[in-house]
Image: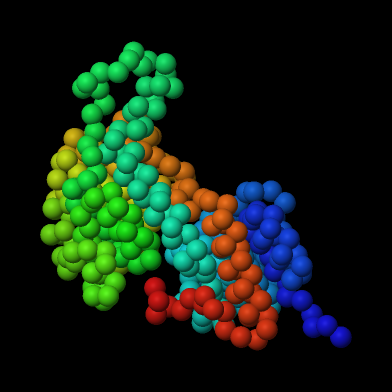
Amino acid sequence: MPSKRLSVVVTRRLPDEVETRMKELFDVELRSDDTPMTRAELSEAMWRADVLVPTVTDTIDAALIGQAGERLKLIASYGAGIDHVDVETARARGILVSNTPGVVTDDTADMVMALILCVTRRIPEGLSLMQAGEWSGWSPTALLGGRLGGRRLGILGMGRIGQAVARRARAFGMQVHYHNRRRLRPAVEEPLEATYWESLDQMVARMDVVSVNCPHTPSTFHLMNARRLQLMKPTSVIVNTSRGEVIDENALIRKLKAGDLAGAGLDVYEHGTDVSPELRSLPNVALLPHMGSATREGRIEMGEKVIINVKTFADGHRPPDQVVPAML
């Protein structure tokens, strides 16, 4: 007699290939429309499921975990970020947590370079001019930006994505600098020709471009605060494809409005979808709707990782991408 299949609840629409494979393997409940579950719906799902598959749009906090049913044994998050799940409370309840690291590294690093180019070459301003039908022809002095070659790039967070950004930046002729909790091993650092800064303050004061590539944790909240933003050169730009909470957004807006910063490229925001109208109105800012990892290939690979984590757990083994509090 075949063993009973795990009951799996998926909180958002996933690519068809992923949903179809889940249907083949598990007793899966799929989302009919692509809207986030309400808090009440999440609570109900966590009561009836063996496995919950949430995304970054679902806040799985201590209160929700406390209401979970005895059946729930795995939260297999669809995404690399894990700051939306209270991992410590889940662990205390005997609920494992997994994520999908690594699969969107190149996609996100590509978007970092796209944002750097957008801001330094004033692409949003050019697009706006064309879309408004206001372009009157080429001019030697119109929309002058700056070339990337020779500029100093400071990478805040030199994990998988930070290193992928460094490789791309070198191809553009940029000089790579970085700040990280720990210095990289020489075997990793030397091929990137990367300069390590133990002091974040000293690094940001000397960079032409700062790229935020660290996760959001209690220790990185407002890591780029008003004081550190003030250290940046007026000619420098900042890009963020990681988590909005790492930058003090109000302080960033003040610097941009005052002309104390040349520009910013953002794919994530401190208050989620509640993006400041002031930020949206600034001409020297490139804003994207959290699409850094939005490639079809990446989304499918994320789903495959979720399936592997759930299937491994169903077979009685530790999910390969299990997250524990010590990792945060």
Q: Residue furthest right?
A: 1
Q: Quadrant of residue 255?
A: top left
Q: Is residue 128 above or below residue 191?
A: above
Residue at 56 percent across and 66 percent down: it is: 77
Viewer-nearest residue: 294 or 325: 294
Indicate how the structure is coloured in the image.
Answer: rainbow
Of the 4 image quadrants, the one containing the N terminus is bottom right
Of the 4 image quadrants, the one containing the C terminus is bottom left
- In the displayed structure, does residue 48 sit left or right of residue 89? right
- In the displayed structure, does residue 207 sit left or right of residue 41? left
Q: Quadrant of residue 305?
A: bottom right
Can residue 273 be seen from the camera position used here?
A: yes
- In the displayed structure, does residue 226 sit left or right of residue 219? left
- In the displayed structure, does residue 233 sit left or right of residue 188? left
Can residue 61 be seen from the camera position used here?
A: no
Q: Is residue 212 above or below residue 133?
A: below
Q: Is residue 241 above or below residue 76?
A: above
Residue at 28 percent across and 49 percent down: it is: 172
Residue 188 in percent (x, y) is at 29, 72
Residue 49 in percent (x, y) is at 69, 71
Residue at 43 percent across and 58 percent down: it is: 106
For the image shown, how many numbered marks are present on the structure?
0
Residue 183 in percent (x, y) is at 23, 73
